[in-house]
Amino acid sequence: HAHTDRTHNTHYIKMKYRLSLATIAARLSVAPTSTAVAFTSNPAFTSSSATHVYRSPSFSVKRPTARTYARATSPLFSSPPTRYLLSYDYIPDVLEKRGPYREGHLGLAKQMLGDEVAVSGGPTLTPGESVPSGALFIFTTKEAAEKFVAEDPYVANGIVTGHSILEWTVVVGNN
């Protein structure tokens, strides 16, 4: 009798959520036959925001909420993302001289964040110092990092004395 209940529950869950699973598979860019793997292996679906849990005697499935759909934006088993680190060196009196150019500098950074080609950025300081010695930015493409340098008022007006762009493969953590 227990086997019949499990079979019925499994069939009911598959039938009820077939469309949802297909939708999730499409969103994750995986084959529909891989949806069980996507359901259980993707961290977006095992977070605390996936609050709808369906259980049967043989298995349990967390049904994703709208918030978890938004976090599942890449294929399951893709290669690690490559990012580009833009490092700036500033003039020693950056705090006194950046004023007229700061709005343009920050505006460009915010625009590139909105365009989703910049990930984050900000000043860097030597421990114990109060004046930034430079800045570090993370971009999704090398071209975006180069564009930032080319259009940044800090570079054009001598606030930045040097820069470098490094390729970075993210292996651990979020980016």
Image: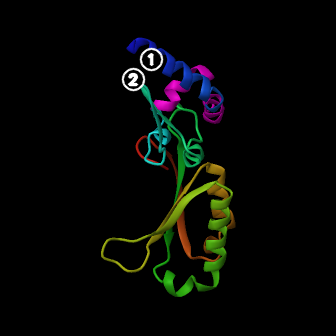
Residue at 31% across, 71% down: 127
What element does badge 1 sit on? helix
- Report whether 47 appears left or right of 150: left
Overall secondary structure of the magenta section: helix
Looking at the image, which is closer to me, 20 or 138?
20
Q: What is the CA distance from the residue labelled 1 to the residue labelled 2?
A: 8 Å
Name the residue carrying label 1. Answer: 5
Q: Where residue 51 sits: x, y (%)?
A: 47, 45
Is 33 in the magenta? Answer: yes
Tell me if label 1 and label 2 are in contact, CB under 8 Å.
yes
User: Disc 1 marks which amino acid?
Assistant: Asp
**Picture residue at 55% right of the left edge, 44% below the top:** 65
Residue shown at the point (39%, 71%) measured from the top left: 125
Residue assigned mark 2: 57
Q: Is residue 37 left or right of residue 115?
A: left
Question: In the image, what residue type sits under mark 2?
Answer: Pro
Mark 1 or mark 2: name the one nearer the start of the chain: 1
Residue at (53, 60) in percent of width and height:
120
Image-based side of 4 in relation to 145, left or right:
left
From which residue to which does the magenta span run? 21-40
Q: Is residue 31 visible?
A: no
Q: Residues within 10 Å of mark 2 (few under 14, many from 20)?
A: few
How many marks the image carries: the answer is 2
